[in-house]
Image: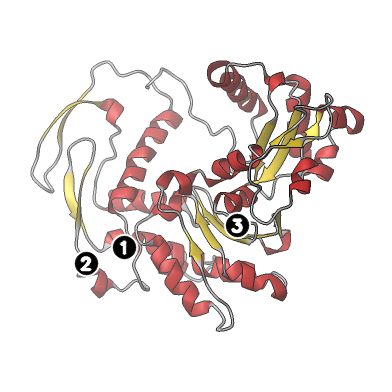
Amino acid sequence: VARPCIPSVPSVPNVPVEDWECFQAILDHTYGKHVKSEPGLHPVLMSEAPWNTRAKREKLTELMFEHYNIPAFFLCKTAVLTAFANGRSTGLVLDSGATHTTAIPVHDGYILQQGIVKSPLAGDFISMQCRELFQELNIDIVPPYMIAAKEPVREGAPPSWKKKEKLPQVSKSWHNFTCNEVIQDFQASVLQVSDSPYDEQVAAQMPTVHYEMPNGYNTDYGAERLRIPEGLFDPSNVKGLSGNTMLGVGHVVTTSIGMCDIDIRPGLYGSVIVTGGNTLLQGFTDRLNRELAQKTPPSMRLKLIASNSTMERRFSPWIGGSILASLVSPGLGGEPGGSPQVGPLKTAPNRPQGTFQQMWISKQEYEEGGKQCVERKCP
């Protein structure tokens, strides 16, 4: 909804919290409008990026216990939760979202920090390529909130639309946000990752895809719909990126596995878990599987795990968290602040129930050990 002068800002860019005031406002809204219950009645499990800092982890722990007075708390790495959501405790999690593509090795439910590999080639990079394409083709990006009416036009003809007379004075950041939504819809509807390294002649023979912008402008897209996402796998194919040291998606995976102990590599190659909204690009997993098959040593068995569900691919850490949180009932049925009790549900893959009995940080443990206990209880 367009509102006058309201900025659009990410509260948790790249996952570690930057704007604590905004983050707390989101928690207040969640408790007040959705949970509709006192925070002190419910334990809280939160996900975190593998590169979250100690200072921010401790500040979050302090906020939850001191301000919200929760009975128990736990922080779990997003990659670990993604592995649990896919029925694994060991695997290589390839997460490609908006800001970065990351390969994160998980072994027996724990992150192997030395094997984490990040690349800035992700969803925002693709959006930038789409913006450049529209500029080259002189296509205006007009978000729906500005359009009062439009008339059908023939393919490639200038759009015929009427601007709303009473437009709110929205902030530039909010306008850019709505424009980016148009671009993201274009990406999902038109773009396709080529089965093999991009070839201009082959791409020119591929079927075109018709797309209509919100203002009515419509046309067919051919080779460019394969050329734009090619940069994810072959950065040298992108104008302005030739000669750089950025890694394509396939190299991100193999580099990460190569930085891990040789004894655990079979388990990583055997469970390459694909997650993140950017991986939903048509043909992404097929291309990745083809590239990894060429790079995988003959002695290793390669298996790619990628959910067919859009929601599961985008929100796998949340799903893994819901599984993990349902396995224990901290402080229920025992002494206040005592050891968590494990319910009769299944445990996460290959992780003993004894681990879960001790995982939560209870209110008593926080009061005795302070915020520093998060480093010990949530590695």
Q: Quadrant of residue 105?
A: bottom right
Cα distance, mark 3 to mark 1?
33 Å
Q: Is residue 321 above or below residue 252?
A: above
Q: Earlier in the sequence, mark 3 or mark 1?
A: 3
Q: Secondary structure at mark 1?
A: helix
Q: Residue at x 38, y 60 (%)?
A: 229
Cα distance, mark 3 to mark 2?
38 Å
How packed is label 2: few (under 14 Cα within 10 Å), some, or many (20 or more)? Answer: few
Q: Secondary structure at mark 2?
A: loop
Q: Can residue 7 be spotted in the picture?
A: yes
Q: Residue at x 59, y 44 (%)?
A: 14
Q: Which mark is residue 88?
A: 3
Looking at the image, what colour scheme do you see?
secondary structure
User: Is there a contact, CB below 8 Å, between mark 2 and mark 1?
Assistant: yes
Residue of label 1: 226
Which residue ends up furthest to the front in the rendered image? Answer: 344
Q: Nearer the viewer, mark 3 or mark 2?
A: 3
Q: Which mark is residue 206?
A: 2
Q: Earlier in the sequence, mark 2 or mark 1?
A: 2
Q: Quadrant of residue 253?
A: bottom right
Q: Nearer the viewer, residue 109 or 4?
A: 109
Q: Secondary structure at mark 3?
A: loop
How packed is label 1: few (under 14 Cα within 10 Å), some, or many (20 or more)? Answer: many
> Picture coordinates of residue 87 (x, y %)?
57, 54
| Left or right side of 157 for 255 | right
Q: Amino acid at mark 2?
A: Met
| Left or right side of 139 for 59 | right
Which residue ends up furthest to the right in the rendered image? Answer: 368
Q: Which mark is residue 80?
A: none
> Picture coordinates of residue 321 (x, y %)?
61, 41
Quarter holding the N terminus is: top left
